[in-house]
Image (tube, rainbow, N blue to C red):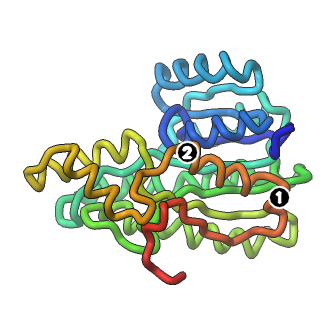
Amino acid sequence: MGIVEGLKVLVTASTRGLGRGAAEVLLDQGAYVVINGRNPENVSKALSELKSRYGERVHGVVADLTSKEDVYRLVDEAVKYLGGLDSLVYITGPPRPGKFTEIGVDEWEYNARLLILNAIWLVNAALPHLRKSSNPSIVFSTSIAVKEPIPYLALSNVLRIGIHGLMKTLARELAPEGIRVNAVLPGHIETERNRRLIEDRALREGKTYEEVYREYASEIPMRRLGKPTEFGWVVTFLVSKYASYVTGASIPVDGGLLRSHF
């Protein structure tokens, strides 16, 4: 019997990468899961692969997280399919790399919707349903950049910090209702996003992909990049009853990369 047996979970941006890793572990541990993506082909492919292993315990909804209307529809469809909601796992696609001076005002506005506003919309839409659950929780995925800014990732460094302000605020306000709210901070995980970052750095520094990959790994005390399912296990723990006294926490999943003391 899995540690989240029977729980009803919505995982956003989950057709691949971190979201897919979280969805797979949640399903493996007995949850009913709605996955989401904005590309219909990606949603269809991921859903087909997951259904072959987990049957009707998984459902997919196409929705663009930068659209408020799509976000509210996503929650409505997830609740309708699941018959309720026990947990919201918030993950978004990553912003592009770049220095502050390379990013236009319109890009900042778009990424504010991608990295902050959609989280507010999702929580507003999900709260009435979470309040009916016997084990309600919200898990936000952000980045280790909220504790130690990462060079050439201005959008992520600036905007993801807002999610931690939201997480801490919600953790305090919702704790009396029994709704737990936490954050997971992934470091270098083997995802398409990190592959693009490695390619970008290799191009900027005139190195090969393999050279930069080794440099990435050498910076990590565990000497390797993480796997999406290793991120997924931490998410699944936070959703489970075993984290019943954990709220307001920011948990790095980074192989020891963070040097900060808090």
> Residue 202, percent across and down?
16, 49
260 displayed left or right of 8? left
Q: Which residue is drawn at 27% across and 60% down?
A: 105
Q: Is residue 154 above or below residue 67?
A: below
> Residue 187, percent across and down?
45, 59
Determine the residue located farthest toward the left in the rendered image: 206
Q: Is residue 212 or residue 173 the one in the foreground?
A: 212
Secondary element under disc 1, as helix, strand or loop, is helix
Q: Is residue 57 above or below residue 127?
A: above
Quadrant location of the C terminus in the rendered image: bottom right
Q: Which mark is residue 242?
A: 1
Q: Which residue is drawn at 63% across and 26% down?
A: 60
Q: How far is disc 1 from disc 2 in space, using C-alphas? A: 33 Å
> Residue 144, percent across and down?
46, 65
Residue type pointed to by label 1: Tyr
Q: Is residue 109 or residue 229 the one in the foreground?
A: 229
The quarter of the picture where residue 259 lies is: bottom left
Q: Single out the mark in the foreground, 1 or 2.
A: 1
Q: Name the residue under label 2.
A: 68
Quadrant location of the N terminus in the rendered image: top right
18 displayed left or right of 175? left
Secondary element under disc 2, as helix, strand or loop, is helix
Between discs 1 and 2, the one toward the N terminus: 2
The quarter of the picture where residue 176 lies is: bottom right
